[in-house]
Image (cartoon, rainbow, N blue to C red):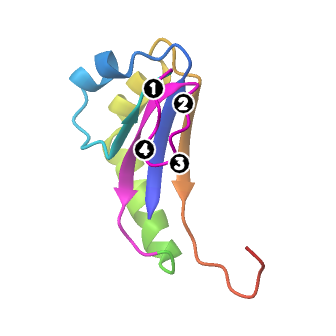
Amino acid sequence: MSVLRASGPDFDVDAFLKGCPWPVSAIFRRGVARVPSGRVAKESGFNFSVSDAGFDEFNRQKDEAIEFLKQNEAEIRRLVGFAGVTGVVLDFGIAWRDVAA
C-alpha cells in the first residue's frame, strides 16, 4: 500500500478538498481527536491511497505511484502550494523479513 499524506497546522483541509478529485481515505483536523487512537491532532490533513498493492509488492506500488504522480501533476502542484500545507509525503508500506519490529 502507498499513501499520499498532506498536513499542516494551519491547513484548511476542507477548502482544499472541495476541488480535489481524489477519493480521500482519512481526514483529520487540528484539535480533534483522531480515531482510533483518541490522540488530539496537532495538524489538519488527509490521507489518500495511491496504490492498493500489498506490502510484498513494492515494484507494483512504485509503478502505480509513478503513474499517479504523472497523471496528477497539476493537482499535486496545487496541493504543495496550498496555504497552510507544510508537509506532503508519499509513504510506501513494505514487508521486511528477519528484522525486529
Q: In the image, is residue 101 above or below residue 36?
A: below
The residue shown at (52%, 46%) is 37
Q: Residue 14, percent across and down?
A: 31, 20
- Which amino acid, mark 2? Val
Distance between the alpha carbons at the discs numbered 3 and 2: 23 Å
Q: Which residues are magenta?
A: 31-54
* Residue 35 is one of the magenta-drawn residues: yes
Distance between the alpha carbons at the discs numbered 2 and 4: 9 Å
- Which amino acid, mark 4? Val
Residue under label 4, please give it: 35
Residue under label 2, please give it: 40
Residue under label 1, please give it: 32
Residue under label 3, please give it: 90
Q: Are marks 1 and 4 in contact (CB under 8 Å)?
A: no
Distance between the alpha carbons at the discs numbered 1 and 4: 9 Å
Judged by depth in the image, the label closer to the viewer, 4 or 3, is 4
Looking at the image, residue 84 sits to the left or right of residue 28; the answer is right
Circle 2 residues within 10 Å: few <14, some 14–19, many ≥20: some
Circle 4 residues within 10 Å: few <14, some 14–19, many ≥20: few
Q: Are marks 2 and 1 in contact (CB under 8 Å)?
A: yes
The residue shown at (47%, 32%) is 33
User: How would you classify the magenta stretch by its main secondary structure?
Assistant: loop
